[in-house]
Image (spheres, rainbow, N blue to C red):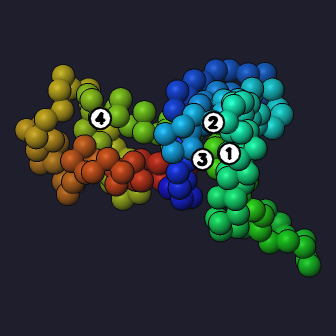
Amino acid sequence: MKYDFGEWSVKNVKTFHGHDGNGYEASLYQGKRRVALVVEDGWGGGLQFHWLVGENVEGSSSSALEAHCGTLPQIPYQSIIVEGGPTSFAVDGAILVDEMVALYQYRRDMRKSMKNHVLWMEGDKLQEGNRVGVVNASVIGLYRDAFKFDKSLNEMPEDDALALYAAVGDA
């Protein structure tokens, strides 16, 4: 994970094809409370926050999200830096939500793969075994003997496995 999401999370992520790329919509949660529907429409605009109305959710939640973003480290520019210009920029709500959605999708994809495949790291590359009926300790042992890896992602705590899985996806 690149960022500390704090009390913020996304659920119910639905993806679709848009005009200028892939889009998604997701429910944004602050703690256990759903506070917004977030839409990346895939038509080239910015991320849209549709804050839920009631109990002053809109003002307090959007302010709380931006306040949380203000606590995060700046992102360094990866392209050419103009002499005397800025070298980094601040994380905002759209960047943070995009990261949450990406992590949500990595977790979903990893869980799906792990149901019928043994996953392991070979150097900095993720390896996926052939499809098997059920992944269990004996199947993992057979793969370990054949491919000489120390530990499969299937055997790791989910957050540790997800960190490796996402790092390969971000590379």
Viewer-proximal residue among 68 and 167: 68
Determine whether 99 is above or below 69 in the image.
Answer: above
Please state which of the two labelled residues, at mark 3 or mark 4, is closer to the viewer: 3
Q: Residues within 10 Å of mark 3 (few under 14, many from 20)?
A: some
Q: Considering the numbered disc 1 on the image, is that residue within a helix, a strand or a loop?
A: helix
Determine whether 111 is above or below 141 in the image.
Answer: above
Find disc 1 in the rendering and name its residue.
Answer: 61
* Alpha carbons under labels 1 and 4: distance apart: 36 Å
Is 36 situated left or right of 9 in this image?
right
Find disc 3 in the rendering and name its residue.
Answer: 99
* Alpha carbons under labels 1 and 3: distance apart: 18 Å
Q: How crowded is mark 4: few (under 14 residues within 10 Å), some or many (20 or more)?
A: some
Q: Considering the numbered disc 4 on the image, is that residue within a helix, a strand or a loop?
A: helix
* Alpha carbons under labels 2 and 1: distance apart: 7 Å
Is 51 situated left or right of 119 in this image?
right
Find disc 4 in the rendering and name its residue.
Answer: 114
- The reply to whether residue 38 is visible in this rendering is no
Please report the residue visible at 70 percent of the width from the left and 63 percent of the height from the top. 70
> Of label 3 and label 4, which has the lower sequence position?
3
Q: Considering the numbered disc 3 on the image, is that residue within a helix, a strand or a loop?
A: helix
Please state which of the two labelled residues, at mark 2 or mark 3, is closer to the viewer: 2
Res. 140 mark: none
- Residue flagged by tag 2: what amino acid is it? Val
Q: Residues within 10 Å of mark 2 (few under 14, many from 20)?
A: many
- Residue flagged by tag 3: what amino acid is it? Glu
- Residue flagged by tag 4: what amino acid is it? Met
> Of label 2 and label 1, which has the lower sequence position?
2
Is 96 situated left or right of 167 in this image?
right
